[in-house]
Image (cartoon, rainbow, N blue to C red):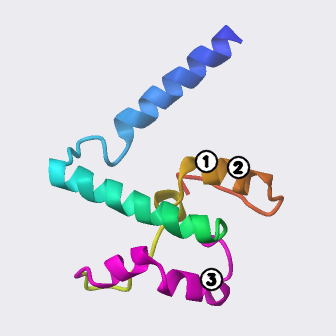
């Protein structure tokens, strides 16, 4: 078990050193904005905890009526807005919900 723990710690350390965001340092304003977005995400998920993985058209009313959508909708961006599940969902959601579906496969690399 000790060898496994050490190997796991080594891999996590290596992953952190290679992650694309390792050199990014957020400003005070950016951290505040991140907290606001996280709070809005939580509020939306309190209404429907499966909103991020359900069928698009089934979940559209919840999405369109959310404060999070209203905020993102006014942000300037020259492409179609979209969310990546790993960025949008809290880790607890990924573990508690998705890990128990037999049809969910995940690879951060691929």
Residue located 83% across and 58% down the image: 102
For the residues labelled 3 and 2, the Cα–Cα distance comes to: 20 Å
Binning the other alpha carbons within 10 Å of mark 3 as few (below 14), some (14 to 19) or many (20 upward) gives some
Question: What residue range appears in magenta?
Answer: 51-76
Instruction: Identify the mark at residue 92; answer none if there is no mark.
Output: 1
Tell me: 76 left or right of 11: left
Q: Residues within 10 Å of mark 2 (few under 14, many from 20)?
A: few
Evaluate if marks 3 and 1 touch, with contact meaning CB atoms under 8 Å apart.
no
| Residue that carries the numbered disc 3 in the rendered image | 59
Quarter of the image with the C terminus is bottom right
Q: Is residue 107 left or right of residue 35?
A: right
Residue positioned 74% across, 61% down in the render: 104
Overall secondary structure of the magenta stretch? Answer: helix
Is residue 60 a member of the stretch shown in magenta?
A: yes
Measured as percent of width and height from the top left, residue 43 is found at 50, 65
**Residue 41 location, x and y as percent?**
47, 64
Which residue lies at the image location 62% right of the left edge and 17% below the top edge?
5
Residue 102 visible in the current orientation:
yes
Q: Report helix, strand or loop for mark 2.
A: helix
Image quadrant where one finds the N terminus:
top right
For residue 95: magenta? Answer: no
**Residue for badge 2:** 96
Label 3 sits on a secondary structure element that is helix
In-front residue for pair 75/9: 75
Contact check, label 2 and label 1, Cβ < 8 Å:
yes
Q: CA distance from mark 3 to mark 1?
A: 20 Å
User: CA separation, marks 2 and 1?
Assistant: 6 Å
Residue 53: x, y in percent?
Answer: 65, 71
């Amino acid at each position: 078990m000790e060898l496994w723990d050490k190997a796991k710690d080594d891999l996590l350390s290596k992953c952190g050193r290679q992650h694309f965001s390792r050199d990014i340092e957020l400003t005070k304003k950016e951290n505040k904005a991140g907290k606001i977005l996280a709070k809005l995400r939580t509020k939306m998920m309190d209404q429907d905890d499966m909103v991020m993985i359900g069928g698009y058209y089934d979940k559209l009313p919840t999405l369109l009526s959310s404060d999070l959508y209203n905020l993102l909708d006014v942000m300037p961006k020259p492409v179609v807005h979209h969310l990546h599940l790993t960025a949008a969902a809290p880790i607890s959601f990924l573990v508690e919900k998705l890990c128990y579906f037999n049809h969910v496969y995940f690879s951060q690399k691929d």
